[in-house]
Image (tube, rainbow, N blue to C red):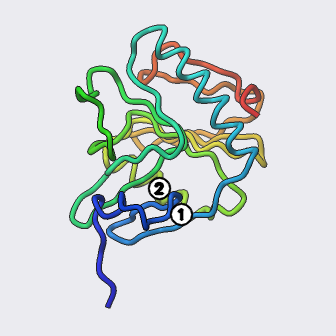
Amino acid sequence: MSRFITADELLQPHISERAELVRGVLVVREPPGFSHGAIVVRLASLLNDHVRSRNLGLVVAGDAGFQLASDPDTVRGADVAFVRRERLPDPVPVAFAAFAPDLAVEILSPGDRPGETLAKVADYLSAGTQLVWVIDPKRRSARIYQEDGTELVIGERDALEGGDVIPGFSCPLDSIF
């Protein structure tokens, strides 16, 4: 019988850098690829420029870990995430944030499975994330999930909108591909 591991154990050096914790079970992921990294940087840069210029909060990238549930623990690593200024602890966490981001962005990799992606979206929304963007580079589209359960699909000619979560943010989806 295998045992659950905790968020603290996930930080240990023997654990893969591309791993998440889902209800106490370690989920190891393959590296996402070069194009994925370029999209992360472009979107994170656009978000960060907007957020910093308006002192709205903090943008993080690179699988920044958020502990979304406890006992058993769930830690998800967002490709890009945003936390409002008023929700940021001082100092910011060195390890995993013990709260959900206001915005979580997942950029699909070739090996991502639809069911796993939807489970990740559900984990974020259940933990209090208000907005989740799932970017699909292959289809050049995005699925927008909101805390009220609504879902919207946009194409490359449409814009990613921050809405009430990141006021004033808008960027054409094709600008990140």
Q: Residue at x 32, y 20 (%)?
A: 85
Q: Amino acid at mark 2?
A: Lys
Image-based side of 106 in relation to 4, left or right: right
Up/down of 60 relative to 48, above or below: below
Q: Nearer the viewer, residue 148 or 20?
A: 20
Image-based side of 50 in relation to 56, left or right: right
Image-based side of 152 in relation to 75, left or right: right
Up/down of 103 relative to 169, above or below: below
Q: Residue at x 32, y 69 (%)?
A: 24
The reply to whether callout 1 and callout 2 are in contact (CB within 8 Å) is yes
Image-based side of 142 in relation to 146, left or right: right
Residue furthest toward the top?
53
- Crowd around label 2: few <14 · some 14–19 · many ≥20 (10 Å): some
Residue 67, position as x, y percentages in the image? 32, 51
**Residue of label 1:** 116
Residue furthest toward the bottom?
1
Residue 106, quarter of the rendered image: top right
Q: Which image quarter holds the N terminus?
A: bottom left
Q: Residue at x 63, y 29 (%)?
A: 43
**Residue of label 2:** 120
Find numbered disc 1 in the image and state the secondary structure of the residue it sits on. Answer: helix
Q: Residue at x 50, y 42 (%)?
A: 145
Q: Amino acid at mark 1?
A: Glu
Find numbered disc 2 in the image and state the secondary structure of the residue it sits on. Answer: helix
